[in-house]
């Protein structure tokens, strides 16, 4: 089969699968099987986190520029699109419905919201990226952090988007929308990383000075990657806003950006599948920790008897959920100290990788001075890539 | 491509795993067995002190009911979840409580923003939710399953405006609000409208955000406008310091506040600088009525400190729910939510609670004067249309002013007779 | 005019606090090229150590000069130890790794400290005991200055002079300057660079702790998250003055403090809401990066291969 047909076929299968799964995501479900709303919600939130993690990975994992204001771009996308759907969504949808039918009109309006949210977030990325990416070093980190704060303050001052009270938004997104766009995000980032641009980005990560010496316009590529990453974060914001149907600036604080960072650190910086795994783990782990303490305690009391549990262990288990952020932070430091490239490193997860890993149990390559091992799965080293870029 | 298909396959498998996990929770409704009630609040975030206080109040009320034999023999179990003060998490934990734990009713949240995010989930699942202390009017507009036991922003802002204009005879007011807090902004809005209607003038409006370290910039600007009173509808953490820094700047106008001021920590932060200020509140810990004194004593014995208004409201929310279950005779819907909505003249710690047609509590507010680490009762202000009950315990002199207050135009902040001198704030250790 | 002088005093007060914290950022950055995100939390730790010292040693009962001195010095020593421990266990093992690794570690350390304090003590604000008998003095007509403000000025000037003396007049200071000039050459010259880096962290942390205790006298409200925004602004102050440059950090701190207070005091007259106070520092940062990336007093440093 020609590649194009094959791809179209694959896309069709995926869409069909998503539509079917979407049916399960309700209490009624299909054939009496439904995912309970709590899990359905977590699954959808995981999808939004996948978009965020994969997009952050483009700038931080592949390009090596540390951004800690992802939540800010998410907020920009969420609020700008929500403004559109709240104030214009209904009338536009009605006038469109007369032409193309209600269902399609609904979808088109939301699609428009997604496009608008992404574009506004991309613009914000451009404004933030140009001054801070011209410079080497850690300025991007601090500027993005500051930007996320400014955005929050600006939104708080706009009463037409709810200000401090929060903004009630029509509910458009569901499982289908979120996962369709999660897949689109993965495809976009995958294609960028495996193109000339991607090789330029990786060369910037490995050695910015050398990349520049090779004739790569490092600022241009960094800004490009940053703008794309911001746009995708904005898209995630649109989906999140229209799924939660309530926006509050309290959801876009520093801690949100931190969660996204920990997803890619956990999953591996420079690994797409790693980011996806990280997003899933970080979505479900805190919820698991809510019930882990009582569960462990009942397990323990079944083994040694309820009266034999020391009081200190008892209180610790009861408070385990309160320590989940401490556990996250400790996890982050631990990973950095032992595996700075993240758990997956730059490897991608696949079945063949599993097979290979079994054959070669010696494990990791030694970590270079840069702390990030050169992409293992690719046959080319970073230097080869630079040469390729040089050759055009 | 293969990879994508593979991961989709994995997801589908996972879904089946989840789908098969459906099971009846411990507290599925009905007329027998333990009554499971969900509480959600901020237990680890910036406003965790509010969430914790409310939780204390809720748990104490549940324990009291259980010790007295439960509701028609059924025991109450409280399941608490932490939402970190994040609206998204609030909606998630409410979904969990409804879906996994099968709670029959929900109590929470303090912050209106978090309640607004979570309330649609309760409404959609037809589980009644009683907010102890979300004062934003929008909260109960979410639907007929959402109600509250506190008064709403318009009323509290109105109370202070009336007090400032009528009792203190203030003409010029400045406002200093917590910009990040819907509560503070709501109070400001209605204070402003009401004060202007009563012929006053707002000479300056400044704002700060929770966690600011310095307020002198705003206070200096306010000082240059010479207001008669300064309305500061914030939370105690900032307010105490604002009072202190105002004193350092030699600002003499008394400050007025809302129930957010009520905390044992207020005095440690503000000290003597708070003398002569006034707040509106749900109740007074110094109220001599036996019900309130018993509540204060029990709370103190159990948690080691004086209950703030949030603890009292949490306590009342649980008691109102229990009362409704008793009246309905069942935890089934829609009988329970109808019983909650029909709450009338319930004798709560924070006043006599009746729910109006919008399921907002209608009850009087008290104005208290701050003096030497005590809250001195000044007057009770009733909402429009509510007639002061004869000989109400909370109101020694109904709607009239006690001698504790002198109009601001006179320079003396005279020491006033103390109604009750029981309260002393413990040291923070 | 009164109002202007008053706002200037207000601005200089918080500016002095930012300056004290910014010194720690700038020294560490000068030596390790690391944004020590946990530095703002050291400021918080300093305030909390002071809080517990005051209660444990019985100084909380009433204002006393002895109490204040003991609490101030005690918390400075404790914070210095914490700073050294963080350097030893979190930063030293990964010093040779990419900048991003150290940066992420720094954020991790910062979050660990914050969340540990929140989990142990709760996020609710606490009241720092008053160790100084508060009194206000009037200057220039109606401008008031309080004792705690005078204390902040006096102690920060003293500490800055002390720091200047350490860096320029002592052997350790000479070594610090050498390490910040070139770590590897300094090592080759026989300087114990590990010790010097440790010492730098101790010095910076002690200054931050002093800032913590001093602010707590001015504003008695302390909570585990108080270091986040203050720390960030102090970092911006360090960048504004020229990162790695010690007088620059002081200048930057004072400027940010004044800019912030003026936005609060006069912003409304020109249509800038008071709430933009936190945004000012970051707006300044973006402007500095656009027009003078080396900061006001900084010199261009060529990136070496």
Image (spheres, coloured by chain):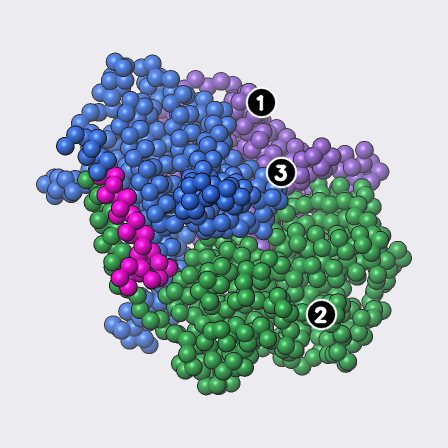
Tell me the residue that label 3 is attached to: C276
The quadrant of the image that shows the C terminus of chain B is bottom right
Tag of residue B364: 2
Asked if residue C11 lies left or right of residue B400, the reply is: left
The quadrant of the image that shows the N terminus of chain B is top left
> Residue shown at 25%/55% (left/top)?
B14
Check if residue A236 falls in the magenta segment.
no
- 1 and 3 marks on the same chain: yes
Q: Of helix, strand and loop, which one carries label 3?
A: helix
> Residue shown at 22%/25% (left/top)?
A381
Comes first in the chain, label 1 or label 3: 3
Q: Which chain is blue?
A: A
Q: CA distance from mark 1 to mark 3?
A: 23 Å
Chain B's colour is green
Magenta stretch? A10-37
Q: Position of residue C166 (x, y in %)?
A: 53, 31
The numbered mark 1 sits on a residue in which chain? C
């Amino acid at each position: 089969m020609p590649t194009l047909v094959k791809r179209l076929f694959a896309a069709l299968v995926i869409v069909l699968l998503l539509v079917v799964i979407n049916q399960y995501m309700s209490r009624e479900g299909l054939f009496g099987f439904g995912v309970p709303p709590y899990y359905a919600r977590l699954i959808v939130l995981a999808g939004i986190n996948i978009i965020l993690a994969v997009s952050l990975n483009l700038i931080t994992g592949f390009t090596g520029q540390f951004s800690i204001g992802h939540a800010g771009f998410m907020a920009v996308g969420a609020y700008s699109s929500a403004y559109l759907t709240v104030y214009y969504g209904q009338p536009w949808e009605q006038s469109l419905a007369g032409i193309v039918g209600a269902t399609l009109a609904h979808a088109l309006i939301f699609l428009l919201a997604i496009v608008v949210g992404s574009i506004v977030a991309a613009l914000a990325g451009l404004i933030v990226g140009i001054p801070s990416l011209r410079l080497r070093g850690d300025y991007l980190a601090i500027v993005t952090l500051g930007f996320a704060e400014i955005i929050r303050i600006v939104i708080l001052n706009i009463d037409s988007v709810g200000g401090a009270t929060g903004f009630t938004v029509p509910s458009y997104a569901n499982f289908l929308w979120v996962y369709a766009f999660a897949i689109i995000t993965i495809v976009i980032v995958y294609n960028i990383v495996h193109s000339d641009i991607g090789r330029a980005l990786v060369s910037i990560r490995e050695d910015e000075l050398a990349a520049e010496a090779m004739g790569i316009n490092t600022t241009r590529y960094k800004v490009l990657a940053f703008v794309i990453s911001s746009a995708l974060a904005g898209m995630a914001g649109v989906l999140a806003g229209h799924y939660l149907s309530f926006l509050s600036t309290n959801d876009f604080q520093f801690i949100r950006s931190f969660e996204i960072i920990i997803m890619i650190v956990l999953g591996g910086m420079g690994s797409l599948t790693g980011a996806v795994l990280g997003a899933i783990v970080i979505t479900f782990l805190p919820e698991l920790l809510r019930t882990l303490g009582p569960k462990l305690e009942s397990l323990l009391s079944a083994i040694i008897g309820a009266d034999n549990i020391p009081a200190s262990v008892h209180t610790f288990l009861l408070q385990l959920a309160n320590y989940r952020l401490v556990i996250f932070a400790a996890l982050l430091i631990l990973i950095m100290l032992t595996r700075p490239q993240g758990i997956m490193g730059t490897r991608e997860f696949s079945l063949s990788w599993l097979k290979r890993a079994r054959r070669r149990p010696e494990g990791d390559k030694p970590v270079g001075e840069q702390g990030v091992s050169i992409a293992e799965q690719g046959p080319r080293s970073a230097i080869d890539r630079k040469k390729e870029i040089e050759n055009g | 491509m293969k990879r994508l298909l593979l991961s989709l396959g994995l997801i589908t498998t996972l879904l089946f795993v989840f789908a098969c996990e459906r099971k009846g929770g411990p507290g599925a409704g009905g007329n027998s067995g333990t009554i499971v009630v969900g509480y959600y609040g901020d237990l680890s975030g910036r406003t965790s002190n509010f969430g914790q206080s409310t939780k204390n109040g809720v748990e104490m009320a549940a324990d009291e009911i259980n010790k007295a034999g439960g509701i028609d023999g059924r025991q109450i179990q409280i399941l608490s979840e932490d939402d970190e003060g994040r609206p998204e998490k609030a909606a998630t934990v409410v979904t969990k409580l409804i879906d996994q734990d099968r709670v029959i009713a929900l109590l929470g949240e303090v912050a209106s923003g978090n309640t607004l995010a979570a309330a649609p989930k309760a409404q959609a699942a037809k589980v009644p939710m009683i907010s102890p202390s979300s004062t934003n009017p929008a909260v109960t507009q979410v639907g007929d399953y959402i109600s509250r036991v506190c008064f709403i922003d318009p009323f509290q802002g109105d109370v202070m405006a009336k007090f400032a204009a009528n009792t203190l005879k203030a003409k010029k007011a400045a406002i200093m609000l917590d910009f990040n807090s819907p509560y503070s902004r709501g109070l400001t809005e209605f204070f402003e409208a009401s004060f202007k209607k009563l012929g006053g003038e707002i000479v300056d409006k400044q704002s700060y955000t929770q966690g600011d370290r310095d307020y002198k910039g705003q206070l200096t600007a306010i000082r240059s406008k010479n207001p008669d009173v300064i309305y500061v509808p914030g939370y105690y953490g900032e307010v105490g310091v604002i009072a202190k820094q105002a004193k350092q700047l030699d600002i003499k106008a008394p400050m007025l506040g809302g129930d957010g001021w009520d905390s044992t920590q207020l005095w440690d932060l503000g000290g003597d600088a708070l003398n002569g200020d006034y707040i509106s509140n749900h109740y007074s810990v110094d109220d001599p009525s036996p019900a309130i004194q018993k509540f204060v004593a029990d709370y103190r014995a159990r948690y080691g400190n004086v209950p703030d208004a949030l603890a009292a409201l949490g306590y009342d929310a649980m008691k109102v729910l229990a009362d409704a279950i008793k009246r309905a005779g069942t935890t089934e819907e829609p009988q329970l939510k109808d019983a909650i909505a029909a709450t009338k003249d319930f004798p709560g710690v924070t006043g006599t609670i009746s729910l109006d047609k919008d399921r907002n509590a209608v009850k009087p507010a008290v104005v208290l004067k701050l003096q030497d680490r005590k809250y001195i009762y000044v007057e009770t202000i009733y909402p429009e249309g509510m007639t002061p009950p004869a000989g109400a315990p909370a109101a020694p002199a109904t709607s009239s002013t006690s001698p504790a207050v002198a109009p601001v135009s006179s320079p003396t902040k005279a020491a006033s007779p103390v109604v009750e001198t029981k309260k002393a704030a413990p040291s923070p250790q | 005019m009164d109002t202007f002088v008053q706002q200037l005093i207000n601005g200089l007060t918080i500016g002095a606090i930012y300056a004290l914290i910014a010194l720690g950022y700038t020294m560490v950055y000068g030596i390790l090229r690391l944004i020590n995100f946990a530095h703002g939390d050291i400021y918080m730790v300093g305030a909390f150590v002071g809080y517990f010292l005051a209660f444990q040693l019985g100084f909380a009962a009433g204002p006393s000069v002895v109490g204040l001195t003991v609490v101030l010095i005690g918390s400075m020593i404790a914070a210095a130890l914490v700073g050294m421990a963080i350097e030893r266990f979190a930063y030293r093992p990964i010093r040779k790794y990419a900048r991003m690794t150290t940066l992420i570690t720094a954020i991790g350390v910062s979050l660990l400290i914050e969340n540990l304090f929140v989990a142990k003590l709760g996020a609710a604000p606490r009241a720092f005991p008053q160790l100084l008998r508060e009194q206000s003095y009037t200057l220039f007509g109606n401008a008031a200055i309080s004792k705690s403000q005078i204390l902040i000025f006096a102690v920060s000037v003293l500490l800055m002079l002390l720091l200047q003396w350490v860096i320029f007049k002592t052997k350790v200071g000479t070594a610090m300057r050498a390490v910040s000039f070139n770590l590897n050459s300094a090592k080759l010259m026989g300087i114990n660079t590990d010790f010097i880096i440790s010492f730098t962290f101790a010095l910076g942390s002690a200054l931050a702790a002093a800032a913590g205790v001093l602010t707590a006298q001015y504003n008695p409200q302390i909570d585990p998250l108080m270091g986040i925004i203050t720390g960030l602004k102090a970092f911006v102050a360090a960048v504004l003055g020229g990162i790695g440059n010690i007088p620059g950090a002081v200048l930057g701190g004072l400027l940010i403090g004044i800019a912030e207070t003026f936005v609060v005091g006069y912003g409304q007259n020109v249509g800038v809401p008071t709430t933009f106070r936190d945004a000012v520092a970051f707006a300044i940062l973006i402007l500095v990066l656009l027009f003078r990336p080396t900061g006001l007093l900084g010199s261009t440093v060529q990136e070496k291969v």
